[in-house]
Image (cartoon, helix red, strand yellow):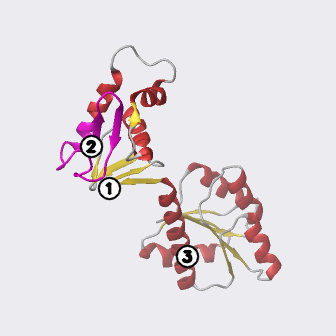
């Protein structure tokens, strides 16, 4: 789990490193808001631990920039010595996902960060993952597997697979796939058949039945079970 810590108190940073690194965390650190914002834009993190009163750019402004300018939804756990209801409301309104008051328990921080990451991963997987039978396609990472075996596809292959999975088990007409790939100017040769063949080789070659079916004279469909007509 990779976490960015934005905190100017060296003692707190050292304590977080000594507690979290042995538990499998990979940590980056920035001592001011501008450095933290730069790291946010350069790297991907599972979570961000953010001090409200970090120098250079305060934590509230930094969190707003993360959400609005970078359109980044990485979970943010905000730390602050201020624990009034108004302070917490300001943190959540700035885009924080959780808020802890200093001094804090390291055990509790660990649990809260893991909960935020687990929740975010579940939300993202649910939004980006297509499933048909034992076939899975993560549209965010462009990774596809069948029965856990990765598919080696071109960009065109992924485009065809996406359309077939979205429509499954319905038949997708050839003309619809050609329009998806080439708009109003499909190639003269039978390029679609070539791409379908390559997709079928990757998708079905090493499995007991073919998911990709040709409907003669109409188009193609994906099925999830062998006995599907």
Residue 115 has which mark? none
Query: With respect to residue 167, does 182 lie above or below?
Result: above
Of labels 3 and 1, the one closer to you: 1
Query: With respect to residue 134, does 222 lie above or below?
Result: above
Q: Residue furthest right?
A: 86
Q: Quadrant of residue 177?
A: top left
Camera sees residue 113: yes
Q: Nearer the viewer, residue 13 or 171?
A: 171
Residue 115 horizontal/vertical position (percent): 53, 75
| Local crowd size for mark 2, using a 10 Å CA cut-off: few (<14), some (14–19), many (≥20) | many
* Sequence-wise first label, 3 or 1: 3
At 27% across and 32% down in the image, what residue appears? 198
Q: Nearer the viewer, residue 54 or 210?
A: 210
Instruction: Determine which residue is flagged by label 2.
Output: 203
* Sequence-wise first label, 2 or 3: 3
Pointers 2 and 3 in contact (CB under 8 A)? no
Q: Quadrant of residue 23?
A: bottom left
**Residue 162 vs residue 62: left or right?**
left
- Cα–Cα gap, marks 3 and 1: 43 Å
| Residue 222 shown in magenta | yes
Instruction: Determine which residue is flagged by label 3.
Output: 16
| Local crowd size for mark 1, using a 10 Å CA cut-off: few (<14), some (14–19), many (≥20) | few
* Sequence-wise first label, 2 or 1: 1
Camera sees residue 142: no
Numbered range of the magenta stretch: 200-229
Q: Nearer the viewer, residue 157 or 114?
A: 157
Query: With respect to residue 105, does 2 lie above or below?
Result: above
Residue 17 horizontal/vertical position (percent): 52, 73
Instruction: Determine which residue is flagged by label 1.
Output: 133
| Local crowd size for mark 3, using a 10 Å CA cut-off: few (<14), some (14–19), many (≥20) | some
At 33% across and 38% down in the image, what residue appears? 153
């Amino acid at each position: 789990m990779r976490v960015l810590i934005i905190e100017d108190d060296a003692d707190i940073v050292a304590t977080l490193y000594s507690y979290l690194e042995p538990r499998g965390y990979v940590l980056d650190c920035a001592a001011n808001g501008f450095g933290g914002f730069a790291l946010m834009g350069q790297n991907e993190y599972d979570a961000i631990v953010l001090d409200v009163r970090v120098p250079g750019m305060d934590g509230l402004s930094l969190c707003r920039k993360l959400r609005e300018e970078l359109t980044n939804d990485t979970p943010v756990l905000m730390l602050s010595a201020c624990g009034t209801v108004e302070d917490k409301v300001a943190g959540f309104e700035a885009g924080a996902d959780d808020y802890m008051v200093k001094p804090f328990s390291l055990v509790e921080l660990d649990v809260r960060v893991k909960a935020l990451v687990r929740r975010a991963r579940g939300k993202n997987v649910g939004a980006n993952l297509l499933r048909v039978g034992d076939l899975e396609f993560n549209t965010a990472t462009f990774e596809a597997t069948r029965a856990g075996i990765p598919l080696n596809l071109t960009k065109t292959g992924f485009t065809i697979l996406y359309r077939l999975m979205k429509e499954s088990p319905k038949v997708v007409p050839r003309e619809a796939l050609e329009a998806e790939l080439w708009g109003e100017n499909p190639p003269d040769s039978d390029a679609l058949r070539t791409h379908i063949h390559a997709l079928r080789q990757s998708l079905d070659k090493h499995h007991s039945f073919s998911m990709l079916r040709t409907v003669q004279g109409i188009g193609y469909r994906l099925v999830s079970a062998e006995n599907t007509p």
